[in-house]
Every structure is written in structure tokens, then in C-alpha cells.
Amino acid sequence: MHAITIPEPGGPDALVWAEVPDPVPNEGEVLVEVAASAVNRADLLQRQGFYDPPPGASRYPGLECSGRIVALGAGVHGWAVGDEVCALLSGGGYAQKVAVPAGQLLPVPEGVDLVTAAALPEVAATVWSNVFMIAHLRPGETLLVHGGASGIGTMAIQLAKAIGAQVAVTAGGPEKLARCAELGADILIDYREQDFVQELRKATDGKGADVILDIIGAKYLDQNVKALATSGRLAIIGLQGGVKGEINLNALLRKRAAITATSLRGRPLGEKAAIVAAVREHVWPLIAGGRVRPVVDRVFPMDRAPEAHRALDEGSHVGKILLTVG
């Protein structure tokens, strides 16, 4: 088969579409013929040599895919050759075939085509696990989403609105904020021009956010604590703004607030399977019912992965950027 390889870490042109050995499904795995994958920030870090796959995972980039099952490993039940699926991966999505633990498979949701389904697994699993399973966002509460126009952001807006929460977002510029509003965001904050702490307080009568979903990290740490409501929960899922920051613990104590930080890629198989099962139970019916939809900005052929990486890095996209296998 062919896959996107990284012979040497570097810029987008470090991605090389090359012939490689076919993967073989181990016990408990299935082999998926890939229709599409999606570009995530983690892929950019891996390309640069900063985010190696966990032990035992495929060395090719790609944290999600859609496609058809072409082979079953020993001990797999409930799936059949020919099933159309999408999957959460630890790596290997940028390829013609990938071996996937059966617990990380999802059926393609009703009303979603096979290629578009590749936009769903990573964002759905990330948002559901952090915002709902860990931070326990409830109806009537306020969620602040940093990067509201990102793949994660567009999913978080829709899921929070679906359960009856108020949603605030930060995004860069009026066009992205308008797209967030179309998805249901109630409070629109241009981080380039406005102080999100002040704007959030004004919009919530001084209360702040009950839950904050943060992709920035250190740069926003102090401001995020200020933006939290009493008993608020800050969920950190990205480090685009650095890895080291100072925090006023007294402010955290006074608010009886909590900070969590998680990633999906390195979690044990059992934890991933539990998250995927929860996504299938809670998120898939919302997609089938038309209340939540995947948001795709643009689609590239897999052998043009360098262009797709440049597009994500440039940052003008809204939603996901996909890679298709012809």
C-alpha cells in the first residue's frame, strides 16, 4: 500500500507519499481500507518531530479515518467485512489501509457520507470526553470555547447547544465569529480585538464560564482562571500558547474551581473504547437527527498532504480539513 511517511522531520514537504508494507490486524483489530483521514494539530507536531506515536502505534500520521472494513482479526465480534466505519486512531490514518482496535470503531452516522465521516471521530471523542464526561457541562450552564471555528470548536458549540447550554466562543475576526454564530454560539468574542475575560463577564452578569475548553494552554492560564465561574471547570486540551504558566492558586481556591488536562492519543485501549462507546450512545443520535453536523472546510487528495498541512497552519479554515484516498 501507500502511506504518508516522514523520512526526516521538518516542514510540510517532509511528508512523502510512499510505498510501505500493508498492515496486518492483530487480535481484536480490524483492517480498514481508508476512504479519508483528517488533519489535526498533532499531525503537524509529529511531522516536525515533536510528537511521536505511542509505543505499538503506526508510525504514519493520522488520528482518525473513515473507510470500509476489509479484514477481521481474531476475536472481533459485531463487525463484518464491508461495513462502512470511521475510527479513532493512535496513528496511521494517512494511508490506504490501517489496522484499528475494534473498540475504536464507529459506524458511519446516518445522513453522513463516507468521506465526511472522517471529520468526526477525533473531535467528537475529544469534546464529549472533556466537556461532558470530565467537566460535566449541564443544561443552563455556560461553556467558553477557545478556537470556536476550529474542528474541536465547531463540534463543541453544537454539542453544548444540543444539551441546552449557553456557548461563548473566541475566534479571530468577524467571518469566523459569524460561522460560530451560525452553529449556535451565543457570545462572540474576537480575541484579536477584545479581552475575553471582560467580554464574558459582561455577557454573563459577572458570573463567568462554568466550563472552559482550552486549546491554548500557558498563555491563557491566568485569564482562564479569572474567567471561570464559582465551581467552574477548566479543561485544557492543547498547548498552542506554550507549556509553562503561572497560576494564582488563591483565585482557584476562592472559586472552588478545577483544572484538568488530557489527551486522547496515549490513553489505554480500554479508556478509548469507553469514550468511543459514549460518543456512539450520546453523539451519534444527535448527528442522525440533524442537530449536530460535521463541519468540513476543504478536502485534499492524500498525496497533497503538504498543502493540507500548510492550510491548517495558516489558520483561515473553519472546521476540519480532510485528506482523501483515491
Image (spheres, rainbow, N blue to C red):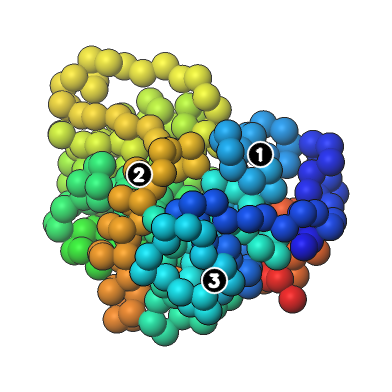
Per the model, the C-alpha gap separating discs 1 and 3 is: 29 Å
At label 1, counting other C-alpha atoms closer than 10 Å, the crowd grade (few under 14, some 14-19, many 20 or more) is: some
- Which amino acid type corresponds to the residue marked 3 in the rendered image? Ile
- Which amino acid type corresponds to the residue marked 1 in the rendered image? Leu
Q: Position of residue 187 (x, y in %)?
A: 33, 57
* Earlier-in-chain disc, 1 versus 3: 1
- Which amino acid type corresponds to the residue marked 2 in the rendered image? Gly
| Residue at screen point 39% across, 47% down | 272
Front residue (pair 10, 197): 10
Residue 45 tag number: 1
Residue 115 left/right relative to 153 = right
Front residue (pair 245, 94): 94
Q: Regarding mark 2 in the picture, which secondary structure is present there?
A: helix
Can residue 251 be seen by looking at this rendering?
A: yes
Q: Position of residue 51 (x, y in %)?
A: 63, 34
Q: Regarding mark 1 in the picture, which secondary structure is present there?
A: helix
| Residue at screen point 72% across, 53% down | 309
Is 250 situated above or below 111? above
Instruction: Name the residue tied to disc 3.
Output: 69
* Earlier-in-chain disc, 2 versus 1: 1
* Earlier-in-chain disc, 3 versus 2: 3
Can residue 204 be seen by looking at this rendering?
A: no
Residue 270 tag number: 2
| Residue at screen point 31% across, 36% down | 234
Q: Nearer the viewer, mark 1 or mark 3?
A: 3
| Outermost residue to the front | 74
Per the model, the C-alpha gap separating discs 3 and 2 is: 21 Å
